[in-house]
Image: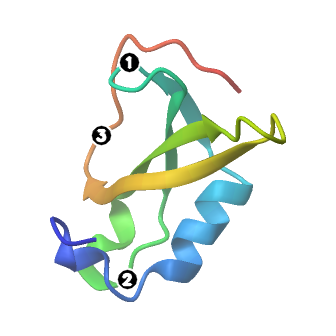
Amino acid sequence: MKRHPEMRGYLDALKVILARPARAYRNTSYEHGLSLWRYGLGKGKRARQWIGMVVNYKENRLTRRRHGEVVTAYFTDTTPKGEESVL
């Protein structure tokens, strides 16, 4: 997370979000992207914030299977408004 060094030490939280997001929206910046969200996984002053992460899913042309790549992850006070949930 070069652009968000505050996310260092939160690998376990990101795994939880990938497995069980509280909210998920299509991310229009990527053809097969999702924005995943979970509240309250931070520590200290971050405990009352959302963690948002953007995952872009790409298809392997040989196997036709998709794999996800985490594009970014960050803390925020709110989630996007007006987005269509995919959960």
Q: Secondary structure at mark 1?
A: loop
Where residue 18 appears, as percent x and y from the top left, is: 64, 56
| Residue type beneath disc 2 | Lys
The residue positioned 60% from the left and 58% from the top of the image is: 17
The residue wearing badge 1 is: 28
Q: Residue 41 in the image: state x and y as whole percent.
A: 49, 70
Q: Nearer the viewer, mark 3 or mark 1?
A: 1
Instruction: Classify 77 as above or below 11.
Output: above
Q: On the image, numbered disc 3 is attached to which residue? A: 78
User: The residue under label 1 is which amino acid type?
Assistant: Thr
Mark toward the start of the polypeptide (3 vs 2)? 2
Q: Secondary structure at mark 2?
A: loop
Left or right of 28 in this view: 75: left
Q: Quadrant of the C terminus?
A: top right
Dot 1 and dot 2 residues touching (CB under 8 Å): no
Query: How far, Cα to Cα, is label 3 from label 1?
Result: 18 Å
Q: Which residue is mark 2?
A: 43
Q: Position of residue 82 (x, y in %)?
A: 38, 10
Looking at the image, is mark 1 or mark 2 nearer the viewer? Answer: 1
